Image (cartoon, helix red, strand yellow):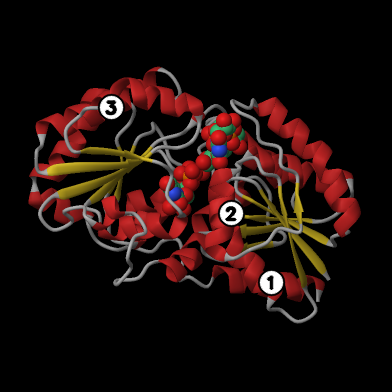
């Protein structure tokens, strides 16, 4: 049986590479990997860390690409991948434009679709944008649904989807298990030399489309204010390669005390940095899953989240996108040891690191 995993961006790759490898070890399964190249450098870096070589590469990325251009190029490019590799099942991940377009292409070719990380919802059409709509559309196209949590399964059940649904945990925890090591040595001297013990290192990322413009400016101004107010804090910010993000960052943050603006990190470097930092401030989906597993408090720089599990467990808080609220919430965690202690405990609502095994088991049972 030929199982073709399709992905195109950094987070999809981090969460799918362990599954591509798990499937490759299964008897009777040929594990194929097709990348759309929606991201280029950030995708290639993950492929290198996990040692995965794609069988097909659509190579679609252009600077400042639009949602339509990504969807159009993926949909067109997938025809060639399907004709050449002839998969029996196509696996897609999460909620990017690659995810939606490749699931749609699978449907046009009448090939069954397995959706990894299924059932996440905010129920707000425009937030996150376009991800909420992408994942809902993929739910309509998919045949197998691999939900990270019971809560995700319940979301699908409310929409009438009960067949072919499996609760597996999130494959990001599988990935994290292979990357984080106590004796890890960073390839960058900046990261090796950070004062992890003497200072409070805050790890920052920000990239969401719905935060472009004023919300992202507010976030950057809040970060600057935090850096100026607390000499005991250092901010480490690997800046996403999106030109929109980089322009906003460059306008507001350079020159702020204790702020390290660096290029995107390879996944293993990022995970180990997270394991050593004091706390995380982010609008990323993946970081909301990883940081709680590592016992790090997270302030989410968004108005909502499709990942309520760690909020309920008390390690993630929604900080919103207003400068004053972000500064106030960060200040509490920096200055109030008790408030920090209440949030800094490891929780694992996203699984035990065996999600890929469960997904591969479900596939081989179903198609075996
Ligand atoms: C995409 C996903 C988003 C996901 C995010 C993860 C969509 C619509 N968005 O958003 O769901 O959370 O990836 O990071 O699917 N760029 C490079 N090199 C790279 C990657 C990006 O130069 O390796 C630049 C390009 O100019 C590109 C721009 O970043 O046009 C934006 O990339 P794009 O994939 O369109 O959007 P993201 O914000 O990365
Ligand atoms: N990540 C990384 N290097 C970085 C920033 C993030 O490897 O410089 C990892 C992070 O640990 C997580 C994933 O990328 O596994 C999250 O990707 P991103 O925030 O781009 O997308 P999202 O999860 O929001 O879709």
Q: Is residue 20 above or below residue 246?
A: below
Q: Quadrant of residue 23?
A: bottom right
Residue 239 vs residue 357, the one in the foreground: 239
Q: Which residue is mark 1?
A: 23
Residue 13 marker: 2
Q: Earlier in the sequence, mark 3 or mark 2?
A: 2
Q: Is residue 226 above or below residue 147?
A: above
Q: Is residue 11 left or right of residue 281?
A: right
Please say if the residues under marks 2 and 1 sit with CB atoms less than 8 Å apart. no
Q: Position of residue 93 (x, y in %)?
A: 63, 52
Residue at left 75%, top 76%? 365
Q: Earlier in the sequence, mark 2 or mark 1?
A: 2
Residue 81 marker: none
Q: Earlier in the sequence, mark 3 or mark 1?
A: 1
Residue 153 vs residue 299, the one in the foreground: 299
Q: Between marks 3 and 1, how big is the CA–CA gap?
A: 44 Å
Q: Is residue 366 above or below residue 15?
A: below
Quarter of the figure with the C terminus:
bottom right
> The residue tagged with tag 1: helix, strand or loop?
helix
Q: Residue furthest top?
A: 214
Residue at left 84%, top 60%? 87
Q: Position of residue 95 (x, y in %)?
A: 60, 43
Q: Is residue 275 above or below residue 299?
A: below
Q: Between marks 2 and 1, how big is the CA–CA gap?
A: 15 Å
Residue 360 vs residue 137, the one in the foreground: 360
Single out the mark in the foreground, 3 or 2: 3
Badge 1: few (under 14), some or many (20 or more) residues near its Cα, within 10 Å? many
Q: Which residue is mark 3?
A: 253
Quarter of the figure with the N terminus:
bottom right
């Amino acid at each position: 049986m030929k199982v073709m995993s399709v992905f195109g961006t950094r987070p999809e790759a981090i969460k799918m590479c362990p599954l591509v490898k798990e499937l490759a070890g299964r008897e009777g399964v040929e594990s194929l990997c097709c990348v759309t190249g929606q991201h280029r450098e950030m995708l290639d870096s993950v492929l290198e860390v996990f040692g995965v070589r794609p069988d097909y590469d659509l190579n679609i990325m252009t600077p400042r690409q639009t949602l339509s251009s990504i969807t159009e190029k993926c949909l067109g490019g997938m025809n060639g991948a399907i004709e050449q590799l002839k998969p029996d099942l196509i696996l897609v991940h999460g909620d990017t434009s690659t995810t939606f377009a490749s699931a749609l292409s699978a449907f046009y070719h009448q090939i069954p679709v397995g959706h990894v990380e299924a059932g996440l919802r905010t129920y707000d059409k425009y937030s996150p944008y376009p991800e909420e709509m992408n994942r809902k559309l993929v739910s309509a196209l998919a045949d197998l649904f691999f939900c990270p949590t019971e809560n995700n399964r319940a979301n699908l059940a409310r929409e009438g989807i009960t067949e072919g649904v499996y609760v597996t945990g999130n494959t990001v925890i599988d990935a994290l298990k292979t990357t984080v090591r106590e004796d890890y040595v960073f390839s960058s001297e900046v990261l090796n030399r950070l004062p992890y013990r003497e200072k409070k290192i805050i790890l920052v990322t920000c990239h969401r489309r719905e935060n472009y413009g004023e919300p992202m400016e507010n976030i950057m101004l809040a970060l600057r204010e935090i850096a100026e107010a607390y000499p005991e804090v250092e901010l480490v910010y690997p800046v996403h390669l999106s030109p929109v993000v980089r322009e906003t960052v460059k306008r507001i943050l350079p020159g702020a005390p204790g702020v390290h603006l660096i290029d995107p990190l390879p996944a293993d470097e990022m995970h180990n940095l997270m394991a050593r930092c004091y706390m995380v401030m982010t609008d990323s989906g993946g970081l909301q899953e990883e940081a709680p597993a590592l016992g790090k408090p997270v302030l989410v720089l968004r108005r909502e989240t499709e990942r309520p599990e760690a909020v309920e467990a008390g390690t993630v808080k929604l900080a919103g996108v207003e400068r004053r609220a972000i500064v106030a919430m960060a200040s509490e965690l920096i200055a109030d040891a008790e408030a920090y202690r209440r949030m800094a405990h490891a929780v694992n609502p996203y699984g035990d690191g065996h999600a890929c095994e469960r997904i591969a088991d479900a596939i081989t049972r179903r198609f075996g």
